[in-house]
Image (spheres, rainbow, N blue to C red):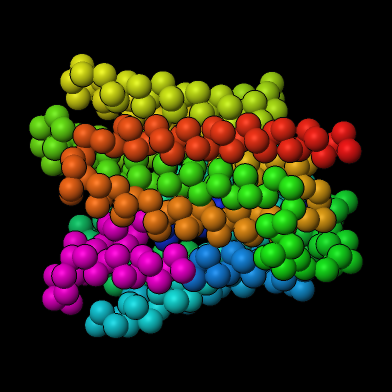
Amino acid sequence: MANLLLSIIYLAFISLGLPDSLLGSAWPTIYREFDVPVSFAGIIFIIISAGTVSSSLLSDYLTRRLGTGKVTALSVLITAVALWGFSVSSQYWMLVLWAIPYGLGAGSVDASLNNYVALHYKSRHMSWLHCMWGIGASVGPYIMSYVMLSGGSWNTGYLSISIIQLVLTAVLFISLPLWKRNKFTDEQLKVSKPMSLKEVIKLPGVKQVMLMFFCYCALEQSAGLWASTYLNIQYGVDSGTAASFGSLFFIGITVGRAISGFVTMKLNDHQMISLGQGIILIGVILMCLPLGYMTALIGLIVVGLGCAPIYPCIIHSTPQNFGQDRSQSVIGVQMASAYVGNIAMPPLFGIISNHIGVYLLPFYLLLILAVMFFMHSSLKKTVAKNRLA
């Protein structure tokens, strides 16, 4: 039964990734069809992100009331309905409207499911599960492009993903009894009260881990968003080739997480985080070297490999750092911090590159990495001090 539930959780993580890249892959067609500026994708992205932040902060309350299984099933259902809404949209304002449940459906399931895995499974499964997310994020655009190249519309692409999500929703509802078979169950979680945001932030080490999550997602998203532009402008790589090269960064993360699952059998979570930061540093240094675009490209791939263990290992270490009864509250706040980093930092580099130059990307990543490194060092000292107290 435990293996069956784990298989379902793997499917759920693939499902989490499926919608994440759809807007980017379909937008070149959508904005022309709706006759809106290309920049209007940013409005939809911000609404989805704001909904995700809000539902992440509510994840502790919802999980304690409903349990992880129900939160996961209901969240996937909400996402499926929102994707169906996108599929029937015929005007831009309809996309804006459906972006609200789109975002709300993502945050709670992300925080709740990550906490459940952190409590019940070893670190290797957390890495492999996030590798499954990467597969889902890669498959989503492929489905969209396949539908459109076969003569269908972007609406049909969204409908296809919605149907997949609805099937998974049915599987999740059928599997609800399986979620209660672990030692630390949702029933035990309900004994304690939900923590307020103020109470969570006051916990020793939470501010540091919030900044770590903020920095990690700021670094990942900034590198992912600007990689192609950096190669194009800084090294003169043509835009089509630069776009394909830029995707190698995310392939690096996905492959890295598959490898990290095996490495976690030898190293603990904090060692994995330090290892990832060291690999990112090597990648950034390669990007700084004046040795041509191939060295810069290799640097970007190395940065992706370094990113691989950090996100899952921060999450997996949360129950150990803050206690099982507090982990859901802390993970919800961590996720919210991560999404804020997603929203704020990539556009900030856009402003910097406009006024100074895109050549600053490696130094921007280095600055973010430095803050993350110091916050991790502070977190380790705080955790060690609490254990001695």
Q: What is the span of residues highlighted in magenta in the rendered image?
A: 21-50
Q: How many marks?
A: 0
Q: Would residue 40 be counted in the magenta stretch? A: yes
Q: Would residue 16 be counted in the magenta stretch? A: no
Rendering quarter of residue 209: top right
Image quadrant where one finds the C terminus: top right
Rendering quarter of residue 320: top right
What secondary structure is the magenta-colored segment mainly? helix
In the rendered image, residue 313, in percent from the top left (x then y), is placed at 63, 38
> Which residue is depicted at the point 31% across and 70% down?
43
> Which residue is depicted at the point 82% across and 56% down?
325
Front position in the image: 111 or 168: 111
> Which residue is depicted at the point 29% across and 83% down?
93
Left or right position of 342 against 112: left
Front position in the image: 214 or 203: 203
The vertical placement of 202 against 159, above or below, is above
